């Protein structure tokens, strides 16, 4: 991936946040976008652009999209569905085009780590005719009342950003239930914590999985941070911290929303840079308010041309 060098970030951020000594790598979005294949089925303005970034996991595409359709059809909101694929081969292309799903493919070589932040930013930049974005993981299915409950939470809290589930946790499906959902033998609406094979996570406090944010706020904080995070990483924690600096990240607890994580091999031990990336979050939180706002301004200036 080509980058440009930028020395405008203050030294405290260079030394404490950004890897690379006295320089930071800033992505050249114009060049990246010029290399993307873009197929937009929904080109009109929508209330929410539901964005997923993927690499592999084609078996999760249908159950996730089916659960989305059921929720969309139960809601009076106008919602588009966008898949951004970062891979050496456009595995999801046919499925998306055949089902009228917005599809963006950036050819990503096998030598590069999956960068969820880049995918989500590309989804927002290239299909942003929406009042808001909902960044969602492909392995998390939703119930048909999802958007109705989300709308209630947003209206009650007057929130510009909200985590689309409650309690800081998603519910986990075991292998058997995951296969049943994939093979359409179990309906997502029938799932709950009382169902055998559904469990709470070992650790609570998840910041990722499903996050709604108004378009204005997304661009104001500079979007996600692909310069800092890739692979299995705390990118959502950093994103959350930036939102709380400008506004407030709420949670969907009234009414409560559950989402269900389909089972797959854990990625938590696959990133050798994970500890370093976690330290970036800690260092950002310990910085002065002025330095935090300065970093956000730098990130905002990178993507503001695409607003």
Image: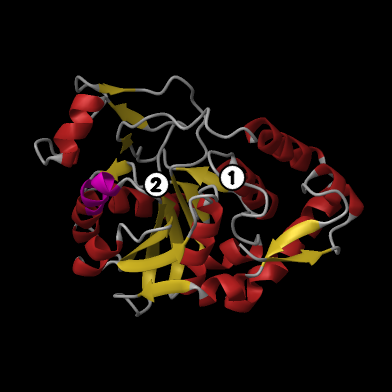
**Residue 21 spot, x, y in % from top left:** 86, 48
Magenta range is: 58-65
In this rendered view, identify the residue nearer to me: 268 or 195: 268
Q: Residue furthest right?
A: 11
Q: Is residue 81 visible?
A: yes
Q: Residue at x 85, y 53 (%)?
A: 290
* Residue holding disc 1: 235
Q: Residue at x 70, y 39 (%)?
A: 281
Identify the image quadrant of the C terminus: bottom right
Question: Overall secondary structure of the magenta stretch?
Answer: helix
Residue 81 vs residue 299: left or right?
left
**Residue 257 spot, x, y in % from top left:** 34, 39
Q: Is residue 63 depicted above or below 99 in this figure?
A: above
Residue 131 vs residue 31: left or right?
left
How would you rate the neighbour count of disc 2 (Cα within 10 Å): few for under 14, some for 14-19, many for 20 or more? some
In this rendered view, identify the residue nearer to me: 229 or 290: 229
* Residue holding disc 2: 137
Residue 290 vs residue 121: left or right?
right
């Amino acid at each position: 991936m080509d980058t440009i060098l930028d020395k405008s970030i203050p030294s405290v951020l260079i030394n404490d946040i950004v890897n690379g000594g006295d320089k930071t790598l800033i992505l050249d979005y114009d060049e990246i976008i010029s290399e993307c294949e873009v197929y937009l089925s929904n080109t009109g303005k929508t209330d929410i652009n539901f964005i997923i970034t993927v690499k592999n996991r084609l078996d999760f595409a249908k159950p996730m999209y089916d659960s989305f359709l059921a929720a969309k059809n139960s809601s009076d909101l106008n919602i588009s569905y966008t898949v951004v694929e970062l891979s050496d081969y456009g595995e999801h292309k046919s499925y998306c085009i055949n089902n009228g799903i917005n599809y963006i493919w950036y050819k990503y070589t096998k030598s590069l780590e999956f960068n969820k932040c880049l995918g989500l930013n590309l989804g927002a930049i290239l299909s942003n005719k929406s009042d808001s974005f909902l960044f969602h993981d492909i392995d998390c299915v939703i119930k048909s009342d999802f958007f109705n409950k989300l709308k209630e939470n947003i209206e009650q809290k007057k929130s510009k950003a909200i985590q689309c589930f409650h309690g800081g946790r998603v519910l986990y499906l075991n292998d058997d239930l995951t296969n049943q959902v994939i093979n359409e033998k179990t309906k997502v609406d029938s799932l709950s914590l009382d169902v055998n094979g559904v469990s709470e996570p070992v650790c609570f406090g998840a910041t990722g999985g499903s996050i709604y944010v108004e378009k204005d706020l997304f661009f104001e904080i500079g979007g996600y941070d692909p310069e800092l995070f890739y692979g299995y990483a705390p990118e959502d924690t950093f994103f959350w911290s930036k939102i709380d600096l400008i506004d407030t990240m709420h949670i969907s607890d009234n009414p409560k929303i559950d989402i269900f994580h389909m089972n797959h091999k854990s990625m938590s031990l696959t990133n050798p840079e994970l500890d370093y990336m976690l330290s970036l979050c800690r260092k950002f939180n310990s910085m002065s308010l002025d330095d935090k706002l300065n970093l956000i301004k730098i990130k905002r200036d990178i993507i503001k041309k695409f607003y």
